Image (cartoon, helix red, strand yellow):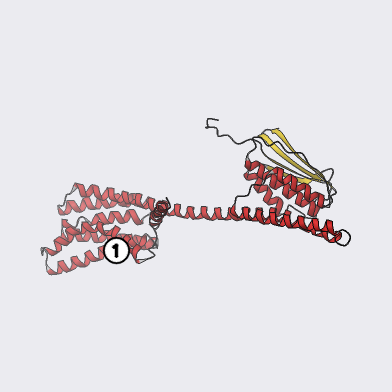
Amino acid sequence: MTDDLRSGEARAERLMRMGESPRTGGEALRKLVWILPWLIFLSSPVQDLVSRAHTTGATVAGWAGLLAFAGIYLTLVFRNMGRQFSEPVVACLVAVLGTLAVVLCLTLGGHWIGLFVYVSVTCGVVFPLRTAYWTIPLTTVAMLLMGLRTGARDGWTLILVLLVGFAMTGVRQLVRTTVELRKARATVAQLAANEERLRLARDLHDLLGHSLSLITLKSELAGRMLPAHPEKAAQQIADIEQVSRQALVDVREAVTGYRRPRLSAELAGARVALTAAGVTAELPAEPDLDGVPEESESALAWALREAVTNVVRHSGARRCAVEVVRRQTLDGPMLELSVEDNGSGGSGSGPGNGLTGLTERLAKAGGTLEAGRSRHGFRLVARTPATAAVDVGSPA
C-alpha cells in the first residue's frame, strides 16, 4: 500500500512539473521528447529540399528558412512553458513564424503547407485564450489561401490545423489548472501544519498552566508545613511528584495527539487544585454524559481546567462554584459548564492566551464561550452540543 502511494505521488509530482522550467537534464529531455514527435510535419519540406527540385540558392535559402522556423517554434513552445517571454516578444516571434510559413510556401511550393500546423500550435500555446481564439482561425485561412495559391489542397491538413490549435488551448488550460492545484496543495499543507502548531500550543498551555500552578501551590504549602508538620509536608511533596508525573504523561499524549481529557477526571482534579489553594469548592457529582460526543466532553474538560487554573492563579477568590447542566436551546440540546468565583477576575485588560485558545477549541466542537464579570465576581460559561450532529441525508 505504501509503495502504491509513493508511486502515485511520484506520478503526480511529474505531472505537477508540466508548465514549469525543467530543473534537471532529465526533465528537459522529457519535455523535448514530448515536443519532438510534432516535427513529423517537417518531413515533407525536408524531402522537398533533398530532392534537388530547386536551384542551389533556393535550396540553401530553404534550409536556412526551415532551421529558423524550427528554432523559433521550439523556442516559443519549449521555453514559454516555463519562463515566459514578454507579450511583445511573443507576438513578434509568432509574426515571424507566420511570415516564414507564407514566404516558404510561396517560394518553394505546396510541400511546405504543413508549416501552418506549427503556427497554429504556437498560437494555441503562447497566446492568451482571447487572442488564440482569433489567431488560430486566421492561421487556417492563411493556409487555405496558400493551398489555393500553390495547388496543395489537402482538406485533412486544413481541419488538422484548426483542431490542433484549439486542442493546444485545452492543453494549456490543463497545465495551468495542474500548476494551480499544486500551489493549492502546498497551501493546504501549510495551513494544516499551522493548525497542528496551534493545537499543540493550546494543549501545552492548558496542561502545563494547570499542573504548574498546582505544583507551585503545593510547594508553598510544603514549605510552610515543613518546620512544624514534616509528615504533612511529606504528603504535599508526594502529591507534587504525582502531579508532575501526570503532567509528563499528559504532555506526551498531547504531543502525539491522543489526549482526550474526561470531564469527571477534570472535576476531581479541580477539587484538589481549589482545596490546595484554600478556595471553597462547590462541585457537582458525577455528570450525566449519556450520548454526549467525545469532542464535546473533551472541550468542556479543557474549559474546566482553564477556568480553575485562572481561579487559582489570578482571581484571588475564596469560593468557586461549578455546574454542569443540560439545556435545550435554539441550536439544539447543549451541555453547559458554568464556573463562577467571587474573585476579581484577574488584572489583564483583555482575554489572555488561555481564553483565546479555549474559544477556538470550543468553536471546533460546535460550542461557544462566554466569560466576564458577574454579580458575585467572575463567571465563565462554556457550551457544547449534547448530541452528535446528524447528516440530513443519512439514514438517521
Secondary structure state at the residue bearing disc 1: helix
Residue in the image at 80% along x and 58% along y: 234
Viewer-proximal residue, 196 or 179?
A: 196
- The picture places residue 318, in percent across and down from the top left corner, at 85, 49
Visible in this render: residue 49? yes
Q: Residue beneath label 1, please?
A: 72
> Residue at point 26% right, 56% down?
118
Residue lying farthest right? 228
Mark 1: give few (<14), some (14-19) or many (20+) Cα within 10 Å. some
Q: Where is the C terminus found, in terms of image quarters?
A: top right
User: Considering depth in this image, is 142 or 181 the residue closer to the camera?
Assistant: 181
Q: Nearer the viewer, residue 236 or 372?
A: 236
| Relative to 4, 317 lies left or right | right
Q: Amino acid at mark 1?
A: Ile
Q: Is residue 265 left or right of residue 105?
A: right
Who is closer to the viewer here, 234 or 269? 234
In the drawing, does residue 214 fall left or right of residue 249?
right
